[in-house]
Image (cartoon, rainbow, N blue to C red):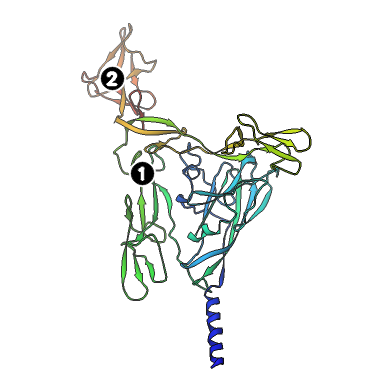
Amino acid sequence: MKKKLLKIAIFTLFVSQTMNIANAQSISKSSGAPTPLQNEFSSATWNYPTQISGKWRGVYNDSRINRMFVETLRLKVPKGCKVVKANFQIRVKNLGAQNYNDSLYMLNGGANLFGQKVWTNEPQGATKLLSYNLANLPTGGSVISRPSASILHTLNDGKFSFFVQDDTSVQSVKLNYQLRGRHCRGSSKPRKPIKGFPVPINNGATNTKQCTFKGVHGNWGPQHNTRKWNYQIVKGGKDYYLHRKGRRTVGLKCGRGESYVIDHYSNGKDACKKCPTSGGTSSGSSSLANKCHKYLIKPKKPTYSYNGVHGNWGPQHNTKKWNYQTVKGGKDYYLHRKGKRTVGLKCGRGETYINDHYSNGKDACRVQTGLGNCPSGYKGGQDNKCYKLIGSTSAIQKVTRVHGNWGPQHNTKKWSYQTVKGGKDYYLRNKGNRTVGMKCGKYETYKVDYYSNGKDACISTKLSCPTGYRLD
């Protein structure tokens, strides 16, 4: 009986251990375009630079400067599992230009988790490998922000997002992580999230409307494949979920303000499309085409991050000999604990000194992190301003009388304007029978018998707007 009980105990211990065994996983990327998720980044980062119609997005091993590199790595985290270890490695290359302020930021759901400057004094063309233990992120030195030492819990949603700005080339990234939980053994195959990314409908037009696409979801929520339900692709029809035990199915749907799009992705998967409700027009629509629009205009408010000010010798603060002194309404400084020697504080290149910024009265160094967002109801323009449509009117074409080859003047003492019904008008010299033909200028089209009196006209091919309106 004792032997039987011992066997049962050993078997129970084995089962309990195997149900919580760690499963090592790895993600590596070193080529092609990144695959970021828009909701993981602020609009200032996602739309960088907002004053340019085409977003300057970087790719792996990019040799161009002024390219914001944004990326979202997808982790496989099955239901019932959690990330217990993670190490992130990123290899970068110095492209020169103004890279002294280039930084790496890690995010989750748009929230900043960690920030650090990439370069110190490395020359152009230099490369280096940055490695981070996501359970214990570094502090001090070139670290800009670190709200928490560990960010492992943020990986449990299956996403790890980061961006690097903007004169630094990302050559490769690697994320090693370990899972622990009831379903993290061996060859378990967690669900694969459906990728979503913005797709411009009309790239060439000024009034482009940006629509976003994401994976369709079931009636119970946004989850995808699970242990019981499997995503089914239906070419030319609506996708659905099929229960793996039996033939039960559940339809897919899109949320409020979204429209269902069949076979949107290259792999044939359906999508939910959502477009802005104001400003611009989509391809094929002429509701706002050739219109003169009037806007309320507001400037964008830049976004900033704040760092602690530092002494002339480096970023360290209080030491055994030096003590940080706050000065209300004035510049803080360091005081030598032995004697009255002091040393002033300063900010780095591209930073602005701000007095009494923190709640405890300490000064700060302010650095601009983005061009800012527009208020609700406003749309960002190409000139760092926000626009809100308040009126529109039809654009008009400019109509002028045709003119001779020698200039825009018409009848003179010597030349007389001659109308020719059904043909081109001309000028006739008053003395003699010499004639000169009429022409139109650049961007103009000749129109015969355009006026009611039969005179010809030049129609401008460029539309014009009244004062205070602009053509979109």
Is residue 353 at all visible to an observer of this figure? yes
Q: Which residue is mark 2?
A: 425
Residue at the spot 63% in from the left edge and 29% down from the top edge: 330
Is residue 472 at all visible to an observer of this figure? no
Mark 1 residue type = Pro
Q: Which residue is mark 1?
A: 276
- Element at label 2: loop
The tag earlier along the polypeptide, 2 or 1, is 1
Residue at the spot 53% in from the left edge and 72% down from the top edge: 20
Q: Name the residue nearer the viewer: 176 or 184.
A: 184
Above or below, comparing residue 71 to residue 208 in the picture: below
Instruction: Give percent across and percent down for residue 198.
Output: 42, 49
Mark 2 residue type = Asp
Above or below, comparing residue 428 to residue 166 in the picture: above
Say which quarter of the image contains residue 53: top left
Q: Residues within 10 Å of mark 1 (few under 14, many from 20)?
A: some
Say which quarter of the image contains residue 413: top left
Say which quarter of the image contains residue 248: bottom left
